[in-house]
Image (cartoon, helix red, strand yellow):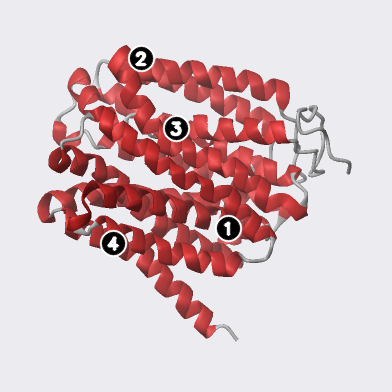
């Protein structure tokens, strides 16, 4: 298939699992979409203390705002993303993106805890459009460069996760917390319109019922050991990632005198770790996936331990943030490339298993972070966070040793 100009977008066309040309411009667009959509999960995290009193939510229940959003996303990954192996992908992306815009408006307009919490759950549930876009891109990319293409797009996803917090903090200073959600809703409508105009259609080969489709998700998990292993590794890494990013803003404010703007700047510096995505894709395409995985699983716990060294101060936290983000993103792209290679006709369902595991791990990491930090302090918190990727490393080494 001849390559298109790097400055032109692939024209929309109906196809069934036949890869369309994935131009450079389309890769950039997909990376932007992934980052913008996944950011919906994180806008509330740094401004919970502004939201809770405004809607009458007690401080002890304020963490429900973040946890319900993540749980909604995990449910969407498991029960909605598999539809991409059954229904036309472009239509699903547009539908979910418009739906999340409505729930963002509902959250912005909420005056009671119940309305806002239900809206938070639904924001997570309908933000899964991003996990339909990534497998769609994998279908469009040629095998020889699939890892690189997916890595470039996934860098947009990680940037969305990392930049959502500082963007939310800064916008809330000028627009209030409700303005953050209204702005995100407008952005989702714009993205839905662009997807309608720019993305090709993809109609899967599968002809089955929804119940059988969901049942096949669990069958895929049982069938492929690589899927189970990669899901576990990334779940443990993302648990430590969520653990760290839930607590480090509090540590910076309480013990280093950072303002909200300072925390926002810290998050921006941490976003440097997003450069791992394209690097990971190239390493995977070159056949270096296993040694790169080992490097990621060693780097993650090492980064967290560096963050716990008292004498390094906030510079140690900066180094920890960059290295941890790099390791998590590196392992994510390596894992996704392996998972996508298992069955071309089941990529959405394979991705559902993989990413559901990842975000369940993230939700558990966020849930454990605050109690451990409040009761045992920063050093113990960092050691607990480092134990998670440390366990992934141990499992990886044991499996490598036991292989014939």
Give the residue at the far right of this rendering: 2
Q: Secondary structure at mark 3?
A: helix
Instruction: State the image coordinates of residue 138 (x, y, percent, origin top left).
Output: 69, 46
Q: How many marks?
A: 4
Residue topped by disc 4: 305
State the quadrant of the C terminus.
Answer: bottom right
Q: Report the Cα–Cα distance between label 2 and label 4.
A: 38 Å
Q: Residue at x 84, y 40 (%)?
A: 3
Q: Which residue carries the number 3 mark?
A: 39
Q: Nearer the viewer, mark 3 or mark 4?
A: 4
Q: Which residue is mark 2?
A: 179
Q: CA distance from mark 3 to mark 4?
A: 28 Å
| Nearer to me, 336 or 204 | 336
Rounded to the nearest angstrom, the CA distance separating label 1 from label 2 is 37 Å
Which mark sits nearer the N-terminus, 1 or 2? Answer: 2
Instruction: Look at the numbered discs 3 and 4 and tell me whether their residues touch, using CB distance below 8 Å.
Output: no
Could you tell me how far apart the alpha carbons at marks 1 and 4 are, in whole angstroms?
24 Å
Looking at the image, which is closer to me, 34 or 315? 315
What whole-number distance in Å separates the C-alpha atoms at marks 3 and 1?
22 Å
Q: Is residue 167 above or below residue 208?
A: above
Q: Quadrant of residue 282?
A: bottom right
SS type, badge 2: helix
Instruction: Please say if 70 is above or below 215.
Output: above
Mark 1, residue position: 334
Pick the residue in front: 160 or 69: 160
């Amino acid at each position: 298939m001849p390559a298109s100009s790097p400055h032109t977008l692939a024209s929309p066309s109906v196809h069934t699992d036949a890869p369309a040309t994935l131009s450079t411009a389309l890769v950039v667009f997909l990376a932007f979409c992934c980052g913008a959509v996944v950011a919906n999960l994180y806008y509330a995290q740094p401004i919970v203390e502004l939201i809770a009193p405004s809607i009458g939510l007690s401080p002890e229940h304020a963490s429900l705002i973040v946890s319900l959003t993540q749980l909604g996303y995990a449910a969407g990954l498991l029960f909605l993303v598999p539809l991409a192996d059954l229904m036309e992908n472009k239509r699903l992306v547009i539908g979910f993106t418009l739906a999340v815009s409505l729930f963002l408006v509902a959250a912005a307009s909420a005056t009671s805890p119940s309305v806002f919490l239900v809206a938070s759950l639904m924001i997570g549930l309908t933000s899964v459009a991003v996990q339909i876009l990534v497998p769609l891109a994998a279908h469009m990319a040629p095998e020889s460069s699939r890892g690189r293409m997916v890595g470039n797009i996934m860098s947009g996803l990680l940037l969305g996760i990392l930049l959502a917090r500082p963007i939310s903090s800064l916008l809330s200073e000028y627009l209030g917390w409700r303005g953050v959600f209204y702005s995100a809703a407008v952005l989702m409508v714009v993205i839905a319109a662009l997807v309608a105009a720019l993305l090709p259609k993809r109609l899967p080969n599968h002809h089955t019922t929804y119940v059988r489709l969901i049942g096949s998700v669990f069958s895929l998990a049982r069938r492929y050991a690589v899927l189970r292993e990669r899901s576990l590794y990334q779940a443990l890494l993302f648990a430590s990632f969520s653990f760290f990013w839930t607590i480090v803003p509090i540590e910076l404010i309480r013990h280093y005198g950072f303002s909200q703007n300072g925390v926002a700047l810290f998050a921006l510096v941490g976003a440097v770790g997003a450069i791992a995505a394209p690097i990971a894709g190239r390493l995977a395409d070159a056949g270096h996936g296993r040694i790169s995985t080992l490097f990621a699983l060693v780097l993650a716990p090492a980064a967290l331990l560096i963050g716990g060294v008292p004498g390094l101060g906030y510079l140690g936290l900066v180094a920890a943030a960059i290295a941890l983000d790099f390791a998590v993103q590196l392992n994510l792209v390596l894992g996704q490339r392996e998972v996508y290679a298992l069955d071309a006709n089941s990529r959405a369902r394979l991705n559902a298993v993989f990413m559901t595991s990842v975000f369940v791990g993230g939700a558990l990491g966020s849930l454990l972070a605050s109690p451990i930090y409040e009761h045992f302090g920063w050093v113990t918190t960092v050691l607990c966070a480092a134990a998670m990727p440390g366990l992934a490393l141990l499992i990886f080494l044991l499996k490598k040793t036991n292989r014939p």
